[in-house]
Image (cartoon, rainbow, N blue to C red):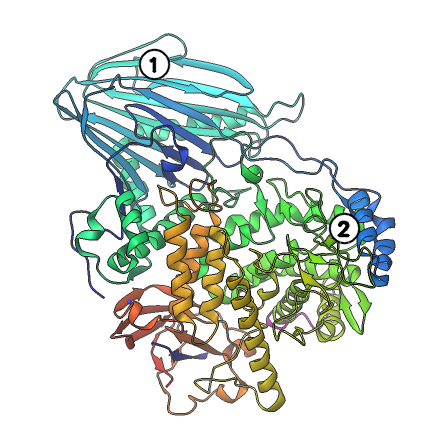
Amino acid sequence: MLVTAFLILGYAAADAAAKWDGTRFAWYTTDAGDDFKSTLPIGNGRLAAAVYGTGTEKLVLNENSVWSGPWLDRANPNSKDAVPKIREMLISGNITGAGQAALDNMAGNPISPRAYHPLVNLGIDFGHGSGISDYTRWLDTFQGTAAVNYTYHGTSYSREYVASYPHGVLAFRLSADQPGKLNANFSLSRSQWVLSRRASVSDGEGGHTVALSADSGQPSDAITFWSEARIVNSGGNATSDGTTVFITGADTVDVFFDAETSYRHPDADAAQRELKRKLDAAVAAGYPAVRDGAVEDFSSLMGRVRLDLGSSGSAGEQPVPTRLSNFRQDPDADPELMTLVFNFGRHLLAASSRDTGPRSLPANLQGIWNDDYDPPWQSKYTININIEMNYWPALVTNLAETHKPLFDLIDMAIPRGRDVARTMYGCERGFVLHHNTDLWGDAAPVDRGTPYTVWPMGAAWLATHAMEHYRFTRNRTFLAEVAWPVLRETARFYHCYLFEWDSYWTTGPSLSPEHSFIVPPGMTTAGAAEGLDISPEMDNQLLHQLFTDVTEACARLGLFSSSSSDDDDDDAETCTTTAETYLPRIRPPAVHPTTGRIQEWRSPEYADTEPGHRHFSPLWGLYPGRQLLLTRAGSGSGSSASGSDSASANLTTAAAAALLDHRMESGSGSTGWSRAWAAALYARVPGRGRDAWRHARQLVATFLLGNLWNSDSGGDSVFQIDGNFGFVAALAEMLLQSHETAPASMRGSPGNNNRRTGVRQGEQQQQEEEEEKEVFVVHLLPALPGDEVPDGRVDGLVARGGFVVRELVWAGGKFARASVLAQNGVSKTTAFWN
């Protein structure tokens, strides 16, 4: 097979050498006190620890399947009969009446699914109060470790914390630089629904034990967990009072921790056997082996991408609070802080989302770090932007395996979504999700309000992640066994749910996430703010992408032609219906006749309630989608289409940019995640790299908490992790883009004035004919902000088609060099497009 990669050049450098590498370490000269938002986060994808680093240490520990209870059947049985009536009300202009009818007949009961809960706190009392000096606390984003050093009464004390993916445990080492000086008391605590607590000492080699079990509080089917810490001391003595283990006079103390839950185990015996197995294995291996294995694993992920945006000199060697304060005054003085935040975001993704076996769970609104039984927004999976943003950096920054838990959750949600599609919409095939879900795959509408409750598009957005995973990895097994079932089930729901209006297939009742409009004269109730309608622009863009993805997957898998089995006939029907009946009749993006901006609602008479709304829903097709994009391949600038198609593409992209500018000028970007989305959107608009960089820097200056977690609205507002991930994706989008489809004229030919070397297939499985003819269009440095980042380098970003970009270097604001490796056994290729 011959695969050709064309690279379109837009416009990463100095290696910092300092005591503290300002791109890798987040370090502090004080502990976190009582502030959870100042802790250091580590994790192995399932277990998490938030390190306070206080004299009396408190570790907030989490396990990602500890939620507030069993599955809830919240589907509203009144919905099926009400939906046609609500549609008629919307079409006739009774907007307020339709909204009230939808809330009365479609809202879930209860209105919210389950919430993510804390696991336990591990307390380690050293008896170190006043008198601590030379204090340092740090997070190593490359190794995934945290540590604390300080001096107390002439003795230097150290603590190191690791989260081991290979061993499936958390592990900590406590030490002193003088023998026999280490004293510590260990206990586990929790404030709700504790079933048992115990502690004991052992004369053997298995370690001393503190353990706690609890559940979610329901009389039946509660989520139950069993947690245990094993304590192994070198030197000194151990005693216990039944709930606490006391270590005195030790040289070092190693701690190994695990928790297992009923979510993943059929009964208590199975969970406790797994708990014992993991802890026995970790204790037998010993802390150095557990630590080295954890670091090797984590570093192998983090080391895949290296970013250099320039040196900060001594400014990058300062503690994080100082750097943040200085950055707000002079961001140009510390470019390494931008790189650190990029690395920190990848650290968070690798720490919070790994394939931990059956029923892996993805990162939620707080990743996997939570200390609150009533966390913000229940710390659930919000799927009208937030969980999708969590995974924007997974593929492009070479962390594809972190994507897997998202598909495990979708797999959990499909049967729930089928039930809701049947009960609420009368659809016998396919599945639906609304704007939130939980660990059980809850599919019913959430909360009660016309701007957010009835949005049956959650599955459509999540399904795009499945196809994107294939585009980046070219894994045909994944396409057939994971992506296709999701795409098929999603499409089948919309084949049933959509209705014809104004010559197009359209949605309704639906909404533009969390936004509302002023009902115009001639509709009811004029002047009221309402959210529910038919045919919101975002829905149309999602449907266009979904049906495009389904059609592509069908072609890849050869499903348009039926075979002898009924299942294959069914697949062929889904493919043909999608490609021929639905995709051609999805409403194209509308441009407002007066403002020249993309029109968010079906009518140009609708006025925005909030012109600077934080959601960029009608710009979904600019990023992360591609329907609103100008195609530059083959022409350097402008569209690769011709005639009226080219003019239309230019008009649509200009209208998208106009709406983006209007939103930002009106106050959008008011949350960390919104600012990250704005940066990514500007990266997709030709010539707006400076704006993308400006908004990325504004996120750092305005929305980061003391430990670099993203906040909801700046200052000391609540922690919400999506902005951390969106920041990473936005910077990656400035450096590399690969969303374009090559025009037919480029296939099999290098095009005008291009230099390229072919990529020849090694010992690989033969691909489909259409894959063999593909041309992958890769834009290098498409949104570089000129002299704002004059020199730099990035290594390891991934482009669609399975290409890894190596040594992408720029100098003086211009491209210098790059090479591209096609993965999976194909040979090296470099290609330039000028």
Residue 184 placement (x, y as % from top left):
27, 18
Name the residue rendered at 48%, 26% in the picture. 273
Q: Which structural element holds mark 1?
A: strand
Q: Residue at x 53, y 72 (%)?
A: 657
The answer to if 562 sits in the magenta stretch is yes
Disc 1 crowd rating (10 Å Cα; few below 14, some 14-19, many 20+) is many
Which is more toward the observer, 736 or 485? Answer: 736
Question: What residue range appears in magenta?
Answer: 555-563
The span from disc 1 to disc 2 (Cα, nearest Å) is: 53 Å
Amino acid tagged 2: Ala
- The quarter holding residue 629 reads bottom right
Front in this rendered view, residue 202 or 408:
408
| Above or below for 473 versus 26 | below
Left or right: 768 in relation to 198: right
For this rendering, which residue is in front, 402 or 709?
709
Q: Is residue 427 left or right of residue 408?
A: right
Rendered image quadrant of residue 560: bottom right
Q: Amino acid at mark 1?
A: Val
- Looking at the image, is mark 1 or mark 2 earlier in the sequence? 1
310, 408: nearer the viewer: 310
Write down the residue under mark 2: 421
Tell me where residue 790 appears, x and y as whole percent. Answer: 27, 70
The answer to whether residue 398 shows anywhere in this view is no
Q: Position of residue 810 (x, y in %)?
A: 27, 73
Report the predominant secondary structure element of the magenta stretch.
loop
Asked if residue 793 is positioned above or below residue 204 in the image, the reply reads below
Q: Which residue is mark 1?
A: 245
Helix, strand or loop at mark 2? helix
Q: How many marks?
A: 2
Instruction: Using the image, determine if residue 405 lies above or below residue 559.
Output: above
Q: What mark, if any, has residue 549 been given in the picture?
A: none
Q: Is residue 602 magenta?
A: no
